[in-house]
Image (cartoon, rainbow, N blue to C red):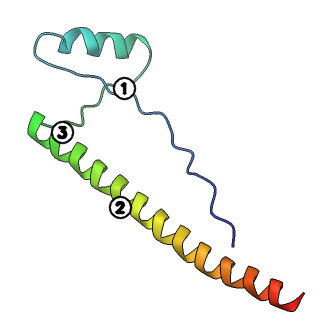
Amino acid sequence: MPLPAPAELEQVRWIIINRENAEEVFADLESKNIDPVIIGLTDEDYENFRMNYAQIRAYMIKQNKIIDAYKEYYEGELQDQKVDNE
């Protein structure tokens, strides 16, 4: 069974807004006809987000290794059967 194609992720643009640049950032967005909406994280929450992403990535790497091991085991078994039948 072939492996699925890698996910094609959409680009995400992060904008850091703080007290000093908030007005400038909003004005820039509005000048580009972009609705300024804030979805905020504290610095601590961003760190948690980053750690979660790292854990998801590590989990996916482990899953790929398991899939590779199963593939090697079963495809190796099929190759052995082909050699025996020849």
Q: Position of residue 13 (x, y in %)?
A: 39, 27
The residues tagged by marks 1 and 2 sit, at their Cα atoms, a distance apart of 36 Å
The mark found on residue 61 in the picture is none
Q: Position of residue 9 (x, y in %)?
A: 51, 43
Instruction: List the residue tagged with mark 3.
Output: 46
Residue drawn at (60%, 73%) of the image: 72
Mark 1 or mark 3: name the one nearer the start of the chain: 1
Dot 3 alpha-carbon crowd within 10 angstroms: few under 14, some 14 to 19, many 20 or more: few
- Between residues 3 and 86, which one lies in front from this camera angle? 86
Q: Is residue 3 left or right of residue 19?
A: right
Kind of residue at badge 1: Asp
Q: Position of residue 30 (x, y in %)?
A: 36, 15
Q: Looking at the picture, does residue 48 appear above or below residue 17?
A: below
The residues tagged by marks 3 and 2 sit, at their Cα atoms, a distance apart of 20 Å
Instruction: List the residue tagged with mark 1.
Output: 35
Q: Looking at the picture, does residue 59 appear above or below residue 85?
A: above
Number of numbered discs on residues? 3
Q: Looking at the picture, does residue 16 appear above or below residue 49?
A: above
**SS under mark 2:** helix
Dot 2 alpha-carbon crowd within 10 angstroms: few under 14, some 14 to 19, many 20 or more: few
Instruction: List the residue tagged with mark 2.
Output: 59
Kind of residue at badge 3: Tyr
Q: Is residue 17 left or right of residue 11?
A: left
Displayed quadrant of residue 62: bottom left
Residue drawn at (77%, 88%) of the image: 81
- Between residues 54 and 39, which one lies in front from this camera angle? 54
Kind of residue at badge 2: Tyr
Image quarter in which the N terminus is found = bottom right
Mark 1 or mark 2: name the one nearer the start of the chain: 1
Q: Residue furthest bottom?
A: 85
